[in-house]
């Protein structure tokens, strides 16, 4: 009999997309129709009996903020996200979990100059506390006797209770000035596709997850087209962007949705 797939962070933007893959959730509250076991990053490790694959997407931070998500409490931020994650991973190794898929971040490279190419063998260099915390968890996972996969994701977008561009779209449609910006993005459906492929992976190590390079000018041009909004678009950004190379996922057959999926999703995101 195949073991269970357990998921932390099911109420977050990443975790919400991964719920269909999970047999049970680990968190502070149960979800309708899904088996549940109690877990909090600030408390003891959960019961992982029967779990074969643990997907760890839980992260404690200020709403809507990852870099800078510690606010004025870096000590509490580290106690939950670094120390709580280490306790979880130690429990996974102790209780016989075969595989851990950890939702890490491109932020493990945020100390490198903008425009740096980021293959999976690039040495991390985090500057932010967020990036340093993710890398500390990666290193701890890599030292344990199980298959540890650190999924370094870029910015995630997609439908959910509070999608990432809600305030941006509202500000643009209200006629506010929008600062230029370019960033790499990946749809939460492509995250779910990637995790589905990794559930049977046996080779540990980092895995990169990224899709499109998106300028706010182009994103809001689509919003303008869909809504007939009369307000001017922001200037195109000129700052170089460091892009993740996703060789491992592509070798497993991962094919992200690209610009086509972005365009298909915008009407839902605007609603």
Image (cartoon, grey):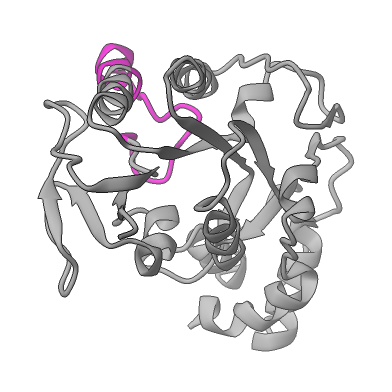
Q: Is residue 228 visible?
A: no
* For residue 211, side relative to residue 104 (left or right): right
Q: Per the image, is 61 magenta?
A: yes
**Vertical placement of residue 70 versus 241, above or below:** above
Q: Which residue is pictured at 36% across the width and 24% down the height?
A: 70
From the viewer's perspective, is residue 195 above or below residue 135? below
- Can you give x and y, in whole percent of width and height, for residue 130 in the image? 48, 24
Q: Which secondary structure is most common in the magenta stretch?
A: loop
**Residue at the spot 68% in from the left edge and 87% down from the top edge:** 226
Count of numbered circles on the image: 0
Image quarter in which the N terminus is found: bottom left
Of the pair 267 and 51, the residue shown nearer to us: 51
Q: Given the current orientation, which residue lies at the most extreme front position?
A: 1
Rendered residue at 12%/27% (across/down): 43
Q: Residue at x 65, y 57 (%)?
A: 186
Q: Nearer the viewer, residue 151 or 167?
A: 151
**Residue 102 x %, y %:** 46, 37
Residue 7 part of the magenta segment:
no
**Location of residue 71 by image quarter:** top left
Percent from the top left, x then y, of residue 82?
35, 19
Residue stretch rendered in magenta on the structure = 60-82
Residue 197 falls left or right of residue 27: right
Residue 176 in view here: yes
Residue 101 spot, x, y in % from top left: 47, 41
Query: Taking 86 as reference, is 26 above or below it?
Result: below
Q: Is residue 144 above or below residue 39?
A: above
Residue 60 falls in image quadrant: top left
254 with respect to 36 (left or right): right
Near-viewer residue (89 or 94): 94
């Amino acid at each position: 009999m195949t073991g269970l797939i357990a998921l932390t962070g099911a109420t977050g933007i990443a975790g919400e997309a991964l719920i269909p893959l999970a047999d049970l959730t680990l968190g502070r509250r149960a979800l309708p129709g899904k088996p549940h076991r109690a877990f909090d990053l600030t408390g003891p490790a959960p019961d992982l009996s029967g779990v074969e694959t643990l997907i760890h997407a839980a992260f404690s931070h200020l709403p809507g903020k990852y870099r800078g998500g510690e606010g004025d409490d870096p000590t509490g931020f580290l106690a939950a996200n670094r120390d709580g994650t280490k306790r979880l991973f130690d429990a996974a190794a102790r209780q016989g979990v075969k595989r851990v898929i950890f939702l890490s971040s491109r932020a493990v490279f945020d100390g490198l100059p903008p425009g740096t190419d980021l293959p999976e063998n690039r040495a991390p260099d985090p500057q932010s506390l967020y990036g340093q915390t993710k890398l500390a968890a990666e290193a701890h996972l890599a030292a344990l006797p199980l298959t540890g996969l650190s999924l370094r994701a870029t910015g995630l977008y997609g439908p959910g209770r509070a999608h990432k561009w809600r305030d941006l779209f509202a500000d643009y449609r209200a006629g506010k000035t929008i600062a230029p910006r370019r960033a790499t993005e990946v749809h939460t459906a492509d995250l779910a596709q990637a995790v589905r492929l990794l559930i049977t992976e046996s080779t540990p190590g980092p895995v990169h997850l990224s899709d499109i390079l998106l300028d706010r000018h182009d994103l809001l041009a689509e919003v303008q087209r869909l809504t007939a909004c009369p307000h001017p678009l922001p200037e195109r950004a000129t700052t170089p962007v460091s892009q993740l190379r996703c060789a491992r996922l592509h070798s497993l057959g991962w094919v992200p949705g690209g610009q086509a999926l972005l365009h298909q999703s915008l009407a839902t995101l605007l609603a």
